[in-house]
Amino acid sequence: MREYLLTLCVTVAVTYLLTGPVRKFAIAAGAMPEIRARDVHREPTPRLGGIAMFGGLCAGLLVADHLRNLNGVFELSNEPRALLSGAALIWLIGVLDDKFEIDALIKLGAQMIAAGVMVMQGLTMLWIPVPFIGTVALTQWQGNLLTVALVVITINAVNFVDGLDGLAAGMVCIAACAFFLYGYRIWFGYGIEAAAPATLFAAILMGMCLGFLPHNMHPARIFMGDSGSMLIGLVLAAAAISMTGQVDPDAMALFAGGERNATHAMLPVFMPLVLPLTIIAIPVADLVLAIVRRTWKGQSPFAADRGHLHHRLLELGHSHSRAVLIMYFWSGLIAFGAVAYSVHSTSMWIVLAISALSAVGLILLLLPRFTPRAPRWAEGLVPPRYRHAARAAAAAAEAAAQDASGAEPEPVRPIVAGVSGVNGATAVGPRSRFPDRRKAESTR
């Protein structure tokens, strides 16, 4: 565990320290596209944050290769090299897209090629656990096609959800944390060395996201761009493929006792199949809904719009930060709930806790639909927007001012829900921390 934590800390530090210089490079290179209709930020913001994340990935793999215990992952498996090869290819395509806006079909082809590169180096699915059937061995072509499909779906799911400041990095970080806990349990608890590469990938992925998040939280100073979103999607898919297709379920020796006990014991075997789906459940749901919505309207499935889940949260009235936190909440609930259920599947307390947290999530989701008002005696304990007297006093003051002036008040410029007036520091230089002060006219 100490070596995993060291790898995580090095990845965080390298990614964090590289992001600042990368931002300056992106500004100098002109990687700041104009604001589009579907964007929620107000100022041009540099992309290419994936360069720093790729640097963190390389640093994490390099450090792990020189540690005593994690060095065995590189000696006994070719999966780290396969991951690095596929990640370098998809990262390069992402950098070109952030700068020159590559066509969507070309990016799709590049994603399939990157997945094929990993398959050629051994990172592929050999078998798949199927509930009520058992472990099903896959032929070479079946495993390769299933691997490519899973990589492409995961990459595009993460790319689709990258629409708000800090959303994609935070959700993938939560997913990687849940996957790390599960992989470490399989590796340490069952003594299966084949789970070590997936655990290492999850730890490095956490470090990449944690190191980038301070620069990407609202208001973001830099975006990860496709170079970052496709990269972390590929690393997440590689961890899932390594855990699902490389770990032999028979090595866990779970088939003991009666049929009921064997069924409960098989849950850790099924979890590598279920957990990746639960981790990307929200991004995949967003992806499927976007394809159905665009196809129904007669548009291309790759046509951009403002109908994603995070856009819907903003339309409901959530602020930018609250919409991101709600997406975090649901991602964590699904991912950690699946991990907890795989550990104690017979405990009803886990089911009740997940149900209660789901109810809390629904309340938070629908909170803007109603505006609660505190009782008179509690108005001093709540923010002004929840007080009866504050709204009445503001309305009376506005009416008095209008009557005194005899003119209509200046119309207030509407602001889109969830969007602040600015989006981090300007892309062309530092912003003054104080308002402009005009010099008073002198009477001398």
Image: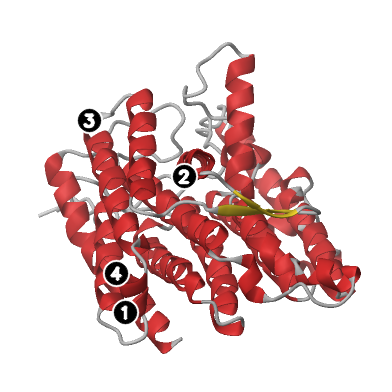
Disc assigned to residue 151: 2
Of residue 227 and residue 140, the one placed in the foreground of this image is: 140
At x 82% / y 70%, what residue is drawn? 262
Q: Which of labels 1 and 3 is toward the front?
A: 1
In front here: 71 or 419? 71
Callout 4 secondary element: helix
- In terms of sequence position, does the residue under pointer 4 or pointer 3 come before the other? 4
Tag 1 and tag 3, C-beta contact below 8 Å: no
Q: Secondary structure at mark 1?
A: helix
Q: Which mark is residue 61?
A: 4
Identify which amino acid the numbered label 4 is placed on: Leu
- Measure the alpha-carbon separation of dots 3 and 2: 24 Å
Q: Residues within 10 Å of mark 1 (few under 14, many from 20)?
A: some
116 on left or right of 170: left
Check disc 1 and report the residue beneath it: 71
Q: Which mark is residue 100?
A: 3
Residue 62: percent from left, percent from top? 24, 72
Q: Amino acid at mark 3?
A: Phe
**What is the secondary structure assignment of the residue under circle 2?**
helix
- Residue 41: image quadrant is top left
Looking at the image, is mark 4 or mark 3 nearer the viewer? Answer: 4
Q: Are marks 1 and 2 in contact (CB under 8 Å)?
A: no
Query: Which residue is nearer to you in this view: 331 or 315?
Result: 331
Distance CA(mark 4)–CA(mark 2): 20 Å
Q: Earlier in the sequence, mark 4 or mark 2?
A: 4
Q: In the figure, 175 relative to 302: above or below?
A: below
Secondary element at tag 3: helix
